[in-house]
Every structure is written in C-alpha cells, then in structure tokens.
Image (tube, helix red, strand yellow):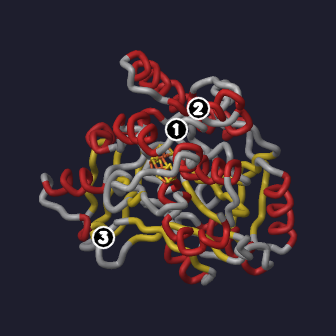
Amino acid sequence: MSEEKIAMVGTPCQIMAASKMQHYTQTPIFFKIGLFCMENFSYSYFSKMLETMDLTMDEVEKFRIEKGFAFLTLKNGKQVKISLSKAKTVVRKNCHICVELTSETSDISIGSIGSENGWSTVIIRTERGEKIIEEAIKQKFIKAKELTPSQLKLLERIASNKIQENYETIEERESKARPVLYVRDKTDESIMDEINVSNFDDLRANVINVGSCVLCGACECVCPEELILIKNTKPRKKRKKCPDDCHMCFAVCPRTFVPIDLRNDLTKAIGNYRKILSVKSLKHNEGQDGVVVTTMLDYLLANNIITKTLVVDKKEDLAWKPYAKLTKDVDEIVKASGTKYSVCPIFKPLKQIKKDVI
Ligand code: SF4
Ligand code: SF4
Ligand code: SF4
C-alpha cells in the first residue's frame, strides 16, 4: 500500500470515477474536491471552430462563459464573442448525457454559481470535508458565510435544468439501444453480477463506441496488465487477451453501472450534503479563477493532511491543451488553477504510483 495521500480536483464525471476507484480498488486518492461543470468542449473541434474565424488557440489568453456567450480575450487585448449555441456545437457528446452539475460524490464541491464575485460556493458532503473546512476557517486560510436562500435557489435551478435537459437525451438514447448504463437503477448485487462477466470489450461496446466515454483515464490507470492506452482520443486496448478474472476497467468506469451509495439521486438537484457555504480565500489572489480550490489544496499540504495534489494544468507548448500532473508545489498549483474547458485523462499520473497501491 502506497504512503501517498492524494487530493484531487476534478469535474463531476472524474470525481465519480475516483469514487468508483475508492469503492472497487485500493487507491491513494484521499480527498476529492469536485468542481461545478455545465459541459466541456472537444479540444480538436474547438480549434477547428476557431480556424473558421481565422483564429488559433495560441492567440487566446482567457476564456469565460457568461450570459449566453463564450468570451475569448486574445493576447493582443481584443475580445471575441461567440454565441453559446455556436460554442455548444463543439461540446463533447458525453456531456449531453451528464446529470451532475456539482460533483455529488466529492468530499467538498466548489464552483462560482450562487456566490457573489470574489466568493465561491462550497458544498460540504462528507464528515472529512466538514472538519477540513472548519479547520481551514480557524487557521484563516478562508472565511465563510451562509448562502442566502435565493443564491441556493439559483444553484438548484441551474443544476435541475441540466439534469432535465440531459435526462431527455438519455431517454432518447436508451430507446435507440445506445445504452447509458450509469443511470440504470440496479441493485449492488446485480451490478456485481454484470461486472463479473465484463471486460474491456464490454466497456468498448457500451461506453466508448456509443459516445459515453468522458476520457477520464480511470480504465487505463487500473488495468493490471497495462493493456489500455489513451493518447489523444478514446481508450484503446492492445491485442493481448485479458485474464478471465479481470473486470477492473469495466468496474471503475464512471459510465458503467454505479453502486447505490454513489448513484445520483435525480430528485436532488445538487445531491446530498451536510452544509453549503459561500467562501472567500484569505491566502491567495482574490480575482483569480479557482482561488478557493488553490487555497484548500494549500491548506491540505501545509497541514500535512495530504502528500500530493492531482490537478489539471495547461500545456506550455500547446495552447489550452490540458494535462494532469501530481504536485506538492503550491506555485505549480497556482499555475494550474482556473477552468480548462476541455478534458484530459486525469488519472494518468497515478500510473506512476499504481504498482504500490493496487
Ligand atoms: S460529462 Fe461533461 S458535463 Fe459532465 S462532468 Fe464530465 S465534463 Fe462535465
Ligand atoms: S486486463 Fe482487465 S483492466 Fe485490463 S483491459 Fe483487460 S479487463 Fe480491462
Ligand atoms: S472508458 Fe475509460 S476513459 Fe472512458 S469514461 Fe470509462 S474509464 Fe474513463
């Protein structure tokens, strides 16, 4: 068993994969900070869309979505406004069947919806999450106040709209024999029966080839035979045969069957929680996107609660291309902060320490 204790920051689908890894395997993931996520864009299609506007990703300094538009701030200072309906044409297919806005299986979830500028909404879901937030307040890393009823209502409304809209797509897909396994209402026993007869071929048929893969990299990370490889697009498997008793990739994938304790309750727009707060950082730059996430990782490292963080940064040589990294350097965490708007196999770096832990 590894000595590592890792805090990860991820989108709801990545946090679900981490929760399934905790459920079915031994993993060094100790603390899960979930982000709010409406959708994510395909990196290659987004680049192509910019090309039609005579732009490249390289020219983009900042990206934000607000009031029905995607705003690009270019390095030359100019602003480009793209209607969200146009931007949505390059949303990843799997995001259209996503029924989570707020990372319901995290320890704490953090996002801007519901809070005023300079503050973040923090949903505390576990006992560990509650203790950590209380202590971070005592040590003056953050300050917190209650969310007002109207702020909470706004968050619930946005989450509920996402569920409703995407659930319609799920129903349509299920009726056309394009399975959406992760929302299916099955007992834990019947899920185990399914897992015990499934391997990568079933993952490919029921998730990857039907546009459900979120490209999280959990399958690649847990494969004991190192047969799965994710390069730029979907997971692929080497030709070698899987051992008859291995079902690991199918078990941990966030888009296969989900055990009851982890399954999204579609009647609760933001899932189960213990407390919900509006939080401001007292340690890091106020204006910076993702500042409360950075501050919480700083707190966890400063108090030796974790050994490393698993975060997503942008590549220096390929503008806006995200990649995952393990780090305990707070400057590196600050550099990685902020929304990326496209995905990468976040669990890839865990392969380095996998041999110790699985
Ligand atoms: S599936 Fe898409 S919308 Fe859902 S959490 Fe993942 S990236 Fe976000
Ligand atoms: S060896 Fe196991 S984890 Fe790897 S691809 Fe085969 S079934 Fe999946
Ligand atoms: S197939 Fe692999 S990469 Fe895709 S969602 Fe499932 S676990 Fe993640």
Q: Local crowd at mark 1 within 10 Å, few (<14), some, or many (≥20)?
A: some
At a point 74% along the width and 76% down the height, the residue shown is 3
Q: Amino acid at mark 3?
A: Ala
Where is mark 1, residue-wise?
A: 198
Q: Quadrant of residue 290?
A: bottom right
> In percent of the image, x 36 and y 34: which residue is there?
210
Q: Position of residue 110 (x, y in %)?
A: 64, 54
Report if the CB atoms under discs 3 and 1 are less than 8 Å apart: no
- Residue at image location 62% in from the left, 36% down from the top: 258
Viewer-nearest of discs 2 and 3:
2
Of the two numbered discs 2 and 3 on the same chain, state the one appearing first in sequence.
2
Q: Secondary structure at mark 2?
A: helix
Q: In the image, is 262 to the left or to the right of 211?
A: right
Expressed as whole percent of the image width and height from the top left, the position of residue 118 reads 61, 61
Q: Is mark 1 within 8 Å of ligand 2?
A: yes
Query: Which residue position holds label 3?
Result: 319
- Upstream in the sequence, badge 3 or badge 1? 1
Asked if the residue at tag 1 contacts the one at tag 2, i.e. Cβ–Cβ closer than 8 Å, the answer is yes
For marks 2 and 1, give the CA distance.
6 Å
How many C-alpha atoms fall within 10 Å of the one at disc 2: few (<14), some, or many (≥20)? some
* Residue underneath mark 2: 194
Q: CA distance from mark 2 to mark 3?
A: 41 Å
**Residue count near mark 3 (Cα–Cα under 10 Å), binned few <14, some 14–19, many ≥20:** some
In-image side of 14 versus 177 (left or right): right
Quick check: can you spot residue 12? no
Q: Is residue 217 left or right of residue 3?
A: left
Q: Which mark is residue 310?
A: none
What is the three-letter code of the residue carrying label 2?
Glu
Q: Is residue 31 above or below residue 156?
A: below
